[in-house]
Image (cartoon, rainbow, N blue to C red):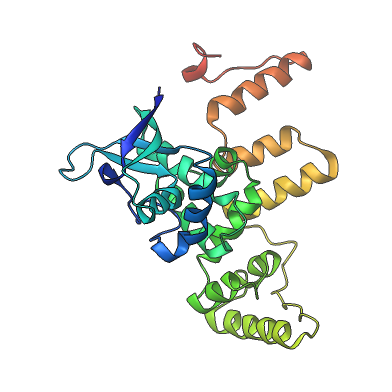
Amino acid sequence: MSSMEVVDLPVKELHADPDFNCRGFIAPIDVVELARDIENHGLQQPISVMPLDGDDSHNYKIICGHRRHKAFEVLNRVTIPCIVRHNLSTADALILNIGENVHRKDLNILQEAWALKRLKLEGFSATEVAKSIGKAATWVYVRYELLELPEEIQEAAAAGFIKQAQIRDLVRLPGRKEQLEAAKKIKMARISGEKTPQILKPKKDMFKKKLRIESEIIDMIEHISESIGMNFGTRCLAWAAGEIADLELFRDIKDLAEIAEIEYTIPEQYKAIL
């Protein structure tokens, strides 16, 4: 359980870690306008920090507010209002940092993707990340998929030449060569103002049975929910994608069995819980 308090802390005691902040390194020139606004109108919102152990030069680590902190440095301010968050895990701190930044309009899609990648490495599923930051699961998946594409395509997406729907199409092409060729055509069409060419995706064998990857399962969940609404089928798919636990699905089965007045045998390991 985290707790917090609001205090004025010395600017020099705060560690602005560029590897932690999803925006990366912030230069003084990046916050000139913000510094001017703070000088004229004051700080509208305190920054968020957490106590930092084992650092001789800093007592706190900045969670949210790296640009505001840099602006205070530019203004040569001695202290800055801070919300001190105690007993906060690293994962929770990452969620707070990313959640604040991804809702701002000035991050490009690649910056968002790199921010989300860190939560993925922490073991968060796409649905968990989506819930944590208030975004749709498909929004998260598109950014995960962008990271699977060649660097040239990532940069084109960051520049706005490649849109979200095209990222999903590009990642499904058979190889790097095909991906780069398709991306180049899309980029050139946007530069010249021509109609964006369609990506020729490999035809699916609708009769072929195979194991599905997580993004395919999520796509099917969304298709079913948009067509007929969320139901037991979508819950089963969510379980298959690793988005809900065994216990949750067994509870659903138990509830449905009771409604249908069907005798249900609960798995032995869940009897005490269910």
Quadrant of residue 18 in the image? bottom left
- Quarter of the image with the C terminus is top right
User: Among all residues in the image, which is located at the extreme right?
Assistant: 228
Name the image quarter holding residue 171: bottom right
Of all residues, the one furthest to the left in this rendering is 56
* Screen quadrant of the N terminus: top left
Q: Position of residue 231 (x, y in %)?
A: 76, 33
Q: Residue furthest top?
A: 272
Q: Position of residue 127 (x, y in %)?
A: 58, 42
Q: Closer to the camera, 253 or 181?
A: 181
Nearest to the observer: residue 176 or residue 194: 194
State left or right for residue 5 relative to residue 42: left
Residue 212 visible in the current orientation: no
Q: Is residue 4 visible?
A: yes
- Residue at 36% x, 34% y is 89
Residue 124 in picture, x, y percent from top left: 47, 43
In this picture, residue 11 sits left or right of residue 112: left
Residue at the spot 66% in from the left edge and 18% down from the top edge: 254
Residue drawn at the location 50% of the way across and 18% of the way down: 270
Q: Is residue 134 above or below residue 18?
A: above
Q: Is residue 112 left or right of residue 261?
A: left
Residue drawn at (63%, 85%) of the image: 184
Q: Residue 170: give x, y in percent of width and height.
A: 63, 72
Work out whether residue 9 or residue 111 is closer to the camera in this orientation and state it.
9
